[in-house]
Image (cartoon, grey):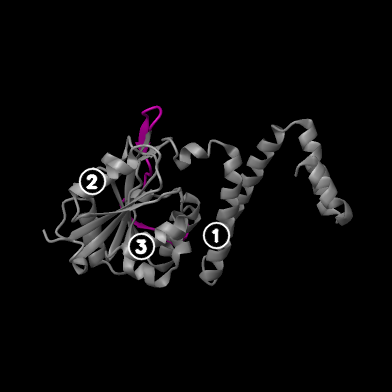
Amino acid sequence: MSNLKEDKEEIKVSVFIVAYNQEDYIKEALDGVLNQKTTFQYEILVHDDASTDNTGKIIRDYENRYPDRIIAFYEETNSYSHYWDFGNRMFQTASGIYAAFCDGDDYWTDENKLQMQFDFMESHPEYSLCVHNSLVLNAKTGESGLYANYSTGELPQGYVIERAGAVFHTSSHFFRFQEWLRNHDSTDTYDLARVCYLASEGKIMYFDKCMSVYRIHTKESWTENITNKYNLIPDFINRLSFYKKFDEDTDFRWHENVSKISSGIEYQMFYEMRAIYRNLSFRRRMNLWLAWTVDCFGLYPLRTWIKTHIGI
């Protein structure tokens, strides 16, 4: 096989892996991608987000062993909160016509995954996204189950937009990458945005074949961090902001679907905030009510003084 870094025009698929403190899992993620059997060339772009364990060392070892296949990015400081920054660097480096994803604690289980999705997209230009089923594996309990229960076939675009985070997993995404780059900026790169925009731009094909594993409750994972309910509120706010932008960008063609998901997010946010409020001390509750009264009735001369003294 020719050196992919010197023969970029031959690369058909770019696979993106993002990892942070996943020394127990990153080998399985890399092996699952490297074991793919394809008739085309593909590259693997791996990002280590300043891991404090051996994740970076493991990635570097693989990079040295597979210089014709792996391109690695190493951060000196953690940059997760600026995903679009390092995501954009990776995207601008990638050469594939198509893109696929696998987080550092997940892995692919079918050696024909890429070839299957590639063949379908090549022969169906009307489809903007190709996905498949995944196995959900609880890293703490060992329990597992299928991610979805849909039949093989086309998924309704509006339904996917309404439930972008729950219809299929990121490890199954496969789409026309270069076409995506021409139409979107770096702020549209994260999972929710990518799925919604792709769903609005073409059909979605779903294969009821389990070809990847989605691990939950691993250390540093999103599923582990959301157990702290205080982290949910900013996530809800960000999602609502995204859907407002998406609604405007798509000329409100999917407004009914956006309204449904936005209403659901607002309800969840209210429910979580209520739970948080109930766990506060009586004094803290009174302080919050006092701050709310100041803002609600426009008691501007008192606002700064009151908020400073009650710690709001």
User: Looking at the rendering, which quadrant does residue 38 occupy?
Assistant: bottom left
- Quick check: marks 1 and 3 in contact, CB under 8 Å? no
Q: CA distance from mark 1 to mark 2?
A: 36 Å
Q: Which numbered circle lies on residue 62?
A: 2
Query: In the rendered structure, does residue 31 fall within the stretch colored magenta?
Result: no
The mark nearer the N terminus, 1 or 2, is 2
Inspect the image, locate mark 2, and give the three-letter code of the amino acid beneath it. Tyr
Q: Which numbered circle lies on residue 259?
A: none
The mark nearer the N terminus, 1 or 3, is 3
- In the displayed structure, does residue 241 sit left or right of residue 161? right
Q: Is residue 51 above or below residue 152?
A: above
- Quick check: marks 2 and 3 in contact, CB under 8 Å? no
* x and y percentages locating residue 160 in the rendered image: 44, 56
Q: CA distance from mark 1 to mark 3?
A: 21 Å
* x and y percentages locating residue 53 in the rendered image: 37, 37
Q: Which residue is mark 3?
A: 91
Q: Which residue is mark 1?
A: 242
Front residue of 285/212: it is: 285
- In the displayed structure, does residue 233 sit left or right of residue 167? right
